Image (cartoon, rainbow, N blue to C red):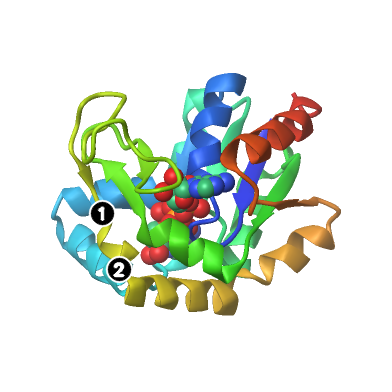
Amino acid sequence: MKVILLGPPGVGKGTQAKQLVEYFKIPHISTGDMLREIVKEESPVGLKVREIMNRGDLVPDDLVTEIVRLRLKKADALSGFILDGYPRTNVQAKSLDEILNDSPLNGAIYLDASQQTLIQRLSGRRVCKKCGANFHITNMPPKSSGICDKCGGELFQRSDDQVETIKKRLNVYLRQTVSLIDYYQSRNKLIKLNADEPASVVYNTLIDILGKWR
Ligand code: AP5
Protein backbone atom coordinates (compact mmCIF):
# COMPACT_ATOMS: atom_id res chain seq x y z
CA MET A 1 0.00 0.00 0.00
CA LYS A 2 1.45 3.38 -1.04
CA VAL A 3 -0.29 6.32 0.53
CA ILE A 4 0.22 10.06 1.02
CA LEU A 5 -1.21 11.94 3.98
CA LEU A 6 -1.84 15.44 2.69
CA GLY A 7 -3.03 18.45 4.63
CA PRO A 8 -2.07 21.64 6.45
CA PRO A 9 0.38 21.87 9.35
CA GLY A 10 -1.18 20.57 12.56
CA VAL A 11 -4.04 18.68 10.94
CA GLY A 12 -2.83 15.40 12.51
CA LYS A 13 -0.78 13.74 9.75
CA GLY A 14 2.00 12.63 12.10
CA THR A 15 -0.38 11.54 14.87
CA GLN A 16 -2.36 9.36 12.46
CA ALA A 17 0.65 8.04 10.52
CA LYS A 18 2.39 6.83 13.72
CA GLN A 19 -0.64 4.69 14.62
CA LEU A 20 -1.42 3.51 11.09
CA VAL A 21 2.08 2.15 10.49
CA GLU A 22 1.82 0.05 13.65
CA TYR A 23 -1.45 -1.40 12.37
CA PHE A 24 -0.37 -1.95 8.75
CA LYS A 25 3.32 -2.77 9.45
CA ILE A 26 4.71 -0.42 6.81
CA PRO A 27 7.14 2.50 7.32
CA HIS A 28 6.12 6.05 8.18
CA ILE A 29 8.17 8.34 5.98
CA SER A 30 8.03 11.90 7.29
CA THR A 31 10.12 14.52 5.51
CA GLY A 32 9.76 16.81 8.55
CA ASP A 33 11.29 14.12 10.80
CA MET A 34 14.07 13.34 8.30
CA LEU A 35 14.92 17.03 7.94
CA ARG A 36 15.00 17.45 11.74
CA GLU A 37 17.56 14.59 11.85
CA ILE A 38 19.71 16.45 9.29
CA VAL A 39 19.45 19.62 11.40
CA LYS A 40 20.82 17.70 14.44
CA GLU A 41 24.06 16.94 12.53
CA GLU A 42 24.93 20.67 12.46
CA SER A 43 26.59 20.26 9.04
CA PRO A 44 26.54 23.27 6.65
CA VAL A 45 23.43 21.77 5.00
CA GLY A 46 21.87 21.13 8.42
CA LEU A 47 22.41 24.74 9.50
CA LYS A 48 20.82 26.03 6.29
CA VAL A 49 17.85 23.65 6.69
CA ARG A 50 17.39 24.74 10.32
CA GLU A 51 17.21 28.39 9.30
CA ILE A 52 14.57 27.62 6.63
CA MET A 53 12.46 25.46 8.97
CA ASN A 54 12.61 27.99 11.80
CA ARG A 55 11.33 30.65 9.39
CA GLY A 56 8.43 28.36 8.42
CA ASP A 57 9.46 28.22 4.75
CA LEU A 58 9.86 25.14 2.58
CA VAL A 59 13.22 23.47 2.09
CA PRO A 60 14.25 23.41 -1.63
CA ASP A 61 12.50 20.80 -3.74
CA ASP A 62 15.68 19.11 -5.01
CA LEU A 63 17.06 18.49 -1.52
CA VAL A 64 13.82 17.05 -0.11
CA THR A 65 13.22 14.95 -3.20
CA GLU A 66 16.69 13.43 -3.01
CA ILE A 67 16.07 12.48 0.64
CA VAL A 68 12.76 10.84 -0.32
CA ARG A 69 14.24 9.09 -3.36
CA LEU A 70 16.94 7.47 -1.18
CA ARG A 71 14.47 6.53 1.55
CA LEU A 72 12.00 4.90 -0.85
CA LYS A 73 14.77 2.68 -2.24
CA LYS A 74 15.26 0.99 1.14
CA ALA A 75 13.98 -2.57 1.39
CA ASP A 76 11.32 -1.84 4.03
CA ALA A 77 9.58 0.68 1.73
CA LEU A 78 9.43 -1.43 -1.40
CA SER A 79 6.05 -2.99 -0.66
CA GLY A 80 4.43 0.03 0.95
CA PHE A 81 4.67 3.21 3.01
CA ILE A 82 2.80 6.17 4.42
CA LEU A 83 4.30 9.44 3.21
CA ASP A 84 3.75 12.36 5.58
CA GLY A 85 4.73 15.90 4.52
CA TYR A 86 5.81 15.02 0.98
CA PRO A 87 4.99 16.13 -1.65
CA ARG A 88 4.39 19.77 -0.74
CA THR A 89 4.69 21.43 -4.17
CA ASN A 90 3.64 20.48 -7.70
CA VAL A 91 7.32 19.99 -8.58
CA GLN A 92 7.63 17.46 -5.73
CA ALA A 93 4.43 15.68 -6.80
CA LYS A 94 5.78 15.24 -10.34
CA SER A 95 9.11 13.99 -8.95
CA LEU A 96 7.26 11.47 -6.79
CA ASP A 97 5.35 10.18 -9.82
CA GLU A 98 8.71 9.67 -11.56
CA ILE A 99 10.26 7.94 -8.54
CA LEU A 100 7.30 5.56 -8.20
CA ASN A 101 7.09 5.03 -11.94
CA ASP A 102 5.47 1.63 -12.55
CA SER A 103 4.26 1.15 -8.97
CA PRO A 104 1.97 4.11 -8.40
CA LEU A 105 0.21 5.44 -5.34
CA ASN A 106 -3.03 3.95 -4.08
CA GLY A 107 -4.15 7.40 -3.07
CA ALA A 108 -3.64 10.72 -1.31
CA ILE A 109 -5.73 11.23 1.81
CA TYR A 110 -6.44 14.90 2.32
CA LEU A 111 -7.02 15.68 5.99
CA ASP A 112 -8.81 18.98 6.44
CA ALA A 113 -9.57 21.10 9.53
CA SER A 114 -10.43 24.72 10.31
CA GLN A 115 -7.70 27.35 10.72
CA GLN A 116 -8.73 27.79 14.37
CA THR A 117 -8.27 24.06 15.03
CA LEU A 118 -4.85 24.06 13.36
CA ILE A 119 -3.54 26.97 15.42
CA GLN A 120 -4.90 25.43 18.64
CA ARG A 121 -3.31 22.05 17.85
CA LEU A 122 0.11 23.41 16.84
CA SER A 123 0.48 25.92 19.65
CA GLY A 124 -0.32 23.23 22.25
CA ARG A 125 1.75 20.43 20.71
CA ARG A 126 4.56 18.91 22.76
CA VAL A 127 7.01 16.33 21.41
CA CYS A 128 9.22 13.83 23.24
CA LYS A 129 12.95 14.61 22.86
CA LYS A 130 13.82 10.93 23.13
CA CYS A 131 11.23 8.94 21.14
CA GLY A 132 9.42 11.65 19.13
CA ALA A 133 5.95 10.81 20.52
CA ASN A 134 3.39 13.59 20.08
CA PHE A 135 1.25 15.09 22.85
CA HIS A 136 -0.97 18.12 23.27
CA ILE A 137 -1.28 20.14 26.46
CA THR A 138 -5.10 19.90 26.43
CA ASN A 139 -6.20 17.54 23.60
CA MET A 140 -3.81 14.68 24.40
CA PRO A 141 -2.03 15.57 27.65
CA PRO A 142 0.68 13.30 29.06
CA LYS A 143 -0.06 11.63 32.42
CA SER A 144 2.70 13.73 34.09
CA SER A 145 3.20 17.23 32.79
CA GLY A 146 6.31 17.55 30.59
CA ILE A 147 7.11 13.80 30.66
CA CYS A 148 6.56 11.31 27.84
CA ASP A 149 4.11 8.50 28.74
CA LYS A 150 5.90 6.07 26.44
CA CYS A 151 9.60 6.41 27.38
CA GLY A 152 9.83 8.94 30.23
CA GLY A 153 11.67 11.43 27.97
CA GLU A 154 11.36 15.19 28.31
CA LEU A 155 8.67 16.94 26.26
CA PHE A 156 9.49 20.12 24.34
CA GLN A 157 7.81 22.61 22.04
CA ARG A 158 9.05 22.62 18.42
CA SER A 159 10.76 25.91 17.54
CA ASP A 160 8.40 26.33 14.55
CA ASP A 161 5.32 25.96 16.80
CA GLN A 162 5.47 29.59 17.99
CA VAL A 163 2.31 31.47 16.95
CA GLU A 164 4.03 33.77 14.41
CA THR A 165 5.79 30.85 12.70
CA ILE A 166 2.57 28.81 12.73
CA LYS A 167 0.83 31.64 10.82
CA LYS A 168 3.71 31.74 8.34
CA ARG A 169 3.54 27.95 7.81
CA LEU A 170 -0.21 28.12 7.21
CA ASN A 171 0.35 30.86 4.58
CA VAL A 172 3.10 28.84 2.93
CA TYR A 173 0.72 25.88 2.82
CA LEU A 174 -1.95 27.99 1.08
CA ARG A 175 0.55 29.41 -1.42
CA GLN A 176 2.58 26.31 -2.25
CA THR A 177 0.82 23.11 -1.19
CA VAL A 178 -2.94 23.53 -1.49
CA SER A 179 -2.77 23.06 -5.30
CA LEU A 180 -1.89 19.40 -4.67
CA ILE A 181 -5.55 18.80 -3.84
CA ASP A 182 -6.37 19.48 -7.52
CA TYR A 183 -3.28 17.56 -8.64
CA TYR A 184 -4.47 14.33 -7.01
CA GLN A 185 -8.18 14.95 -7.58
CA SER A 186 -7.63 15.28 -11.33
CA ARG A 187 -5.87 11.90 -11.23
CA ASN A 188 -8.74 10.28 -9.25
CA LYS A 189 -6.41 9.70 -6.33
CA LEU A 190 -7.85 12.06 -3.71
CA ILE A 191 -9.96 11.16 -0.68
CA LYS A 192 -11.00 14.02 1.61
CA LEU A 193 -11.52 13.52 5.34
CA ASN A 194 -12.76 15.84 8.05
CA ALA A 195 -9.89 15.89 10.57
CA ASP A 196 -11.66 18.33 12.93
CA GLU A 197 -13.00 15.15 14.53
CA PRO A 198 -11.31 13.51 17.55
CA ALA A 199 -8.16 11.56 16.65
CA SER A 200 -9.81 8.18 17.32
CA VAL A 201 -12.65 8.95 14.87
CA VAL A 202 -10.19 10.02 12.15
CA TYR A 203 -8.10 6.90 12.83
CA ASN A 204 -11.06 4.52 12.46
CA THR A 205 -12.08 6.12 9.16
CA LEU A 206 -8.49 5.83 7.89
CA ILE A 207 -8.33 2.16 8.86
CA ASP A 208 -11.49 1.55 6.80
CA ILE A 209 -10.12 3.38 3.75
CA LEU A 210 -6.58 1.99 3.86
CA GLY A 211 -7.80 -1.51 4.71
CA LYS A 212 -9.27 -1.72 1.20
CA TRP A 213 -5.85 -1.03 -0.33
CA ARG A 214 -3.95 -3.63 1.65
P1 AP5 B 1 6.55 18.86 9.18
O1 AP5 B 1 7.21 18.32 10.35
O2 AP5 B 1 6.09 17.96 8.09
O3 AP5 B 1 5.39 19.79 9.67
P2 AP5 B 1 3.92 20.09 9.11
O4 AP5 B 1 3.52 19.57 7.80
O5 AP5 B 1 3.86 21.55 9.27
O6 AP5 B 1 3.04 19.24 9.97
P3 AP5 B 1 3.09 19.11 11.48
O7 AP5 B 1 4.07 18.06 11.89
O8 AP5 B 1 3.28 20.45 12.10
O9 AP5 B 1 1.58 18.68 11.77
P4 AP5 B 1 0.84 17.29 11.66
O10 AP5 B 1 -0.20 17.40 10.61
O11 AP5 B 1 1.80 16.14 11.57
O12 AP5 B 1 0.11 17.32 13.06
P5 AP5 B 1 0.34 16.43 14.36
O13 AP5 B 1 -0.09 15.03 14.10
O14 AP5 B 1 1.71 16.64 14.92
O15 AP5 B 1 7.50 19.93 8.45
C1 AP5 B 1 8.21 20.90 9.20
C2 AP5 B 1 9.03 21.76 8.26
O16 AP5 B 1 9.95 20.94 7.50
C3 AP5 B 1 8.25 22.52 7.19
O17 AP5 B 1 7.73 23.73 7.68
C4 AP5 B 1 9.34 22.73 6.11
O18 AP5 B 1 10.21 23.75 6.47
C5 AP5 B 1 10.11 21.42 6.17
N1 AP5 B 1 9.57 20.41 5.23
C6 AP5 B 1 9.00 19.21 5.57
N2 AP5 B 1 8.63 18.56 4.46
C7 AP5 B 1 8.97 19.33 3.41
C8 AP5 B 1 8.82 19.20 2.01
N3 AP5 B 1 8.23 18.12 1.47
N4 AP5 B 1 9.28 20.20 1.22
C9 AP5 B 1 9.87 21.29 1.74
N5 AP5 B 1 10.04 21.48 3.07
C10 AP5 B 1 9.59 20.52 3.90
O19 AP5 B 1 -0.75 17.08 15.33
C11 AP5 B 1 -0.58 18.38 15.84
C12 AP5 B 1 -1.08 18.44 17.30
O20 AP5 B 1 -2.49 18.22 17.31
C13 AP5 B 1 -0.47 17.39 18.21
O21 AP5 B 1 -0.22 17.99 19.45
C14 AP5 B 1 -1.55 16.30 18.33
O22 AP5 B 1 -1.49 15.70 19.60
C15 AP5 B 1 -2.83 17.10 18.13
N6 AP5 B 1 -3.85 16.37 17.38
C16 AP5 B 1 -3.65 15.65 16.24
N7 AP5 B 1 -4.82 15.15 15.77
C17 AP5 B 1 -5.78 15.59 16.65
C18 AP5 B 1 -7.20 15.43 16.71
N8 AP5 B 1 -7.89 14.75 15.75
N9 AP5 B 1 -7.87 16.01 17.72
C19 AP5 B 1 -7.21 16.73 18.66
N10 AP5 B 1 -5.86 16.93 18.67
C20 AP5 B 1 -5.17 16.37 17.67
Q: Which residue is mark 2?
A: 162
Q: Is residue 107 left or right of residue 99?
A: right
Q: Quadrant of residue 6?
A: bottom right
Q: Quadrant of the C terminus?
A: top right
Q: Is residue 79 left or right of residue 205?
A: left
Task: Please say if 75 is above or below 133.
Answer: above
Nearest the eye: 211 or 65: 211
Residue 180 lies, in percent from the top left, at 68, 65
Residue 178 at least partly seen: yes
Crowd rating for badge 2 (residues with CA inside 10 Å; few <14, some 14–19, many 20+): some
Q: Residue at 77% across / 67% down in the picture?
A: 182
Q: Quadrant of ligand 1?
A: bottom left
Task: Please say if 83 is above or below 178.
Answer: above
Nearest the eye: 126 or 94: 126
Q: Residue at 31% across / 64% down in the picture?
A: 160
Q: Is residue 79 left or right of residue 142?
A: right
Q: Residue at 54% across / 69% down in the picture?
A: 116
Q: Is residue 134 left or right of residue 116?
A: left
Nearest the eye: 20 or 198: 198
Question: Label 1 is placed on what type of residue?
Answer: Gln
Q: Quadrant of the N terminus?
A: top right
Q: Residue at 61% across / 34% down in the picture?
A: 200
The answer to whether mark 1 and mark 2 are in CB contact below 8 A is: yes
Q: Quadrant of residue 145?
A: top left
Residue 171 lies, in percent from the top left, at 50, 78
Q: Which mark is residue 157?
A: 1
Question: Label 2 is placed on what type of residue?
Answer: Gln
Q: Secondary structure at mark 2?
A: loop
